[in-house]
Image (cartoon, rainbow, N blue to C red):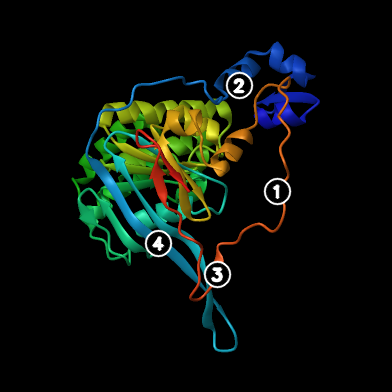
Amino acid sequence: MGVVAEMADRVIVMKSGRMVEEARVTDLFAAPQATYTRDLLAAVPRMGQRGAVPAPAPSDAVATLSDVVVRFPIKGGMLGRTTAQVHAVEHVSFDIRKGETFALVGESGCGKSTIAKAMVGLVPHQGRIEIGGQTLSSLGHDAPKSLRRKVQMVFQDPMAALDPRMRVGELITEPLLIHGIGTANDRRDAAAELMRRVGLSQDQLDRYPHEFSGGQRQRICIARALALKPDLIIADESVSALDVSVQARVLALLKELQDEMGVAFLFISHDMAVVDSISDRVAVMYLGQIVEMGRRAQVFGNPQHPYTQRLIEAVPVPDPTHRRAPSARLGGDIPSPVHPIGSGPDRVALRDIGGGHLVAG
């Protein structure tokens, strides 16, 4: 809706295949007539809308990353030798505490999702990743099942993450079956309870994924992630494909489950307004490295690194009367994370400017 406010002259609002409202963009945002339009605009996350919240009480870390590096080889020449490397993640360190939402933000390709994949053992890494007191093997796939139970993932596209040939009940109970937990009846009861927790009904367990809406499918993915009662759930762009009204309901669900179960979230997104509405602490990534990290109010209320400032300035404002301040166009080539063998990017050092607010430089 922020992009619509900045770019459009006229707007048509559709619901269930029908046009419910048409107006000039200024009229639509100032005085929406249709109930659905009002609901859409009310659900749009806005920077600074959340206001100040007290800092969470100190708690134990459920995940700790120390000097984590992930690089991918690029081969070339007649012999297919490695000639360069993609430095996807470079010397990243942070921790995620019990019951908090830690957000990773940055532009596409900065390394956010690569960190998530390393934490669940999908890509090999250097450095140390510790989940629930256990160290994840640098090879990732050698991690014991007891460690894999502690961290689960919710992906961006729920339809791609759900096997279309399996019923929803089977999808939710599959993690329990893999880990040998409970009898068939126990697993069925657990699936019914998880469906209830995410706002769906037991009667829907025998349906297939294509019979649900996008928001409902994402709720099913969340239910499956909760099946093993993990310490940490990684939400990788988990609401970016949803419309704002459904997105608001899914975010509220995540917060409700966190308060109820004490689960921690690693929330990965490029939508700064969404991150501002849900996170406790934030780390800003640029070209594989963290350039700023701190509590949400510190990073968004007092951004210190130039890249963080540009990210926040670029957030579309859902107000057609808003005029963006002019900014200098970036010149030169876009920096690349690809470096020849034996070379790499300069390593940034974070300094504490007060209260745990860390800034590169």
As displayed, is residue 91 above or below residue 204? below
Q: CA distance from mark 2 to mark 4?
A: 41 Å
Dot 2: element: helix
Circle count: 4
Q: Which residue is mark 2?
A: 40
Q: CA distance from mark 3 to mark 4?
A: 14 Å
Q: Which residue is mark 4?
A: 69
Residue 99 pos. (x, y %): 29, 33
Indicate which disc, 1 or 4, sits on the residue closer to the N terminus.
4
Residue 109 appearing in the image: yes
Question: Which residue occupies the extreme bottom position in the image?
Answer: 79
Residue 179 appearing in the image: no
Residue 198 pos. (x, y %): 37, 30
Give neighbour class at mark 2: few <14, some 14-19, many 20+ (Cα, 10 Å): some
Where is residue 121, by image quadrant? bottom left
Dot 4: element: strand
Q: Residue at x 23, y 45 (%)?
A: 184
For the residue marked with disc 3, what is the amino acid?
His
Q: Which residue is mark 1?
A: 330
Residue 285 pos. (x, y %): 49, 48
For the residue marked with disc 4, what is the amino acid?
Val
Give neighbour class at mark 1: few <14, some 14-19, many 20+ (Cα, 10 Å): few
**C-beta proximity under 8 Å, tags 1 and 4:** no
Q: Which residue is mark 3?
A: 339
Dot 3: element: strand
